[in-house]
Amino acid sequence: MQSNTISKSVCVIDDDDAVRDSLQALLSVGGESVDTFPDARSFLETYQPETISCALIDVRMPGIDGIELLELLAKRGTLPPVVIITGHGDVQMAVRAMKIGAFDFIEKPFEPDALIERVNAAIRWGKDNFAKAQKVKEAKAHLAPLTPREKDVLKCLLAGLSNKAIASKMELSPRTVEVHRAHIMEKSKAESLSHLVRLCLLAGVEPDDQNLE
């Protein structure tokens, strides 16, 4: 049976041939699949974020430098775990890169064990973030079928209002509110009220707590 798992690799983007070869050899020994690129443009030509477990990006490169590359990826909304490789004079730039969204930075010359540890940490972080993003996506999908009126009722439920209070607030009959609640549970496929609340928290649905007495 064919696996649906996407093969992932560590990508090294550095214009220094010796650095690329060194990193490829070092990370391959640890069992990682490694792809190398001499500049940002060659990396972008084949860029598929779902196939990257971690990207090591040098700050100082001709053409598009490491910071500019990071900004381009961040603007696309597809930033993989990134470890910035920086020279001694580039620490401020590396800090700026972390503010953009890089996971970490490491200074040249780097200790092999330290580099491997940072890369492994970045990969673990990426997996955790991917799992969280999947849960958010699934929660939003559960709530997507709700009508605008059902979403209003849901927000009142999250605020702790009773059926009677929701009916009064929304100028509905209590029976209509009960019907909306039943539809909310059915459409969201929530197994219980606590499950529904968890879905809302993941999806970022806020309670309607205005004008509560």
Image: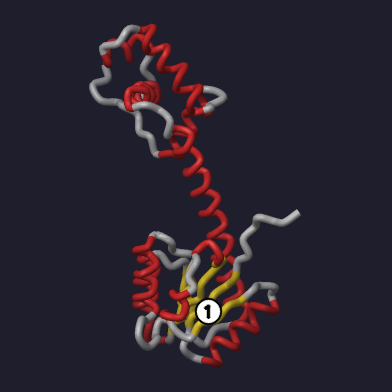
Write the residue at 49% across / 91% down.
16
Mark 1, other Cα within 10 Å: few <14 / some 14–19 / many ≥20: many
Write the residue at 43% across / 30% down.
145
**Residue 151 horizontal side relative to residue 43, left or right:** left
Write the residue at 27% across / 20% down.
212
In the depicted structure, whether residue 66 falls above or below residue 127: below
Expressed as whole percent of the image width and height from the top left, the position of residue 57 reads: 46, 77
Q: Quadrant of the N terminus?
A: bottom right
Write the residue at 48% across / 84% down.
14
Expressed as whole percent of the image width and height from the top left, the position of residue 148 reads: 33, 27
Q: How many marks?
A: 1
Expressed as whole percent of the image width and height from the top left, the position of residue 37 reads: 51, 82
Closer to the camera in the image, 177 or 4: 4
Residue 90 found in image quarter: bottom left
In the depicted structure, whether residue 80 falls above or below residue 93: above
**Residue wearing tag 1:** 12
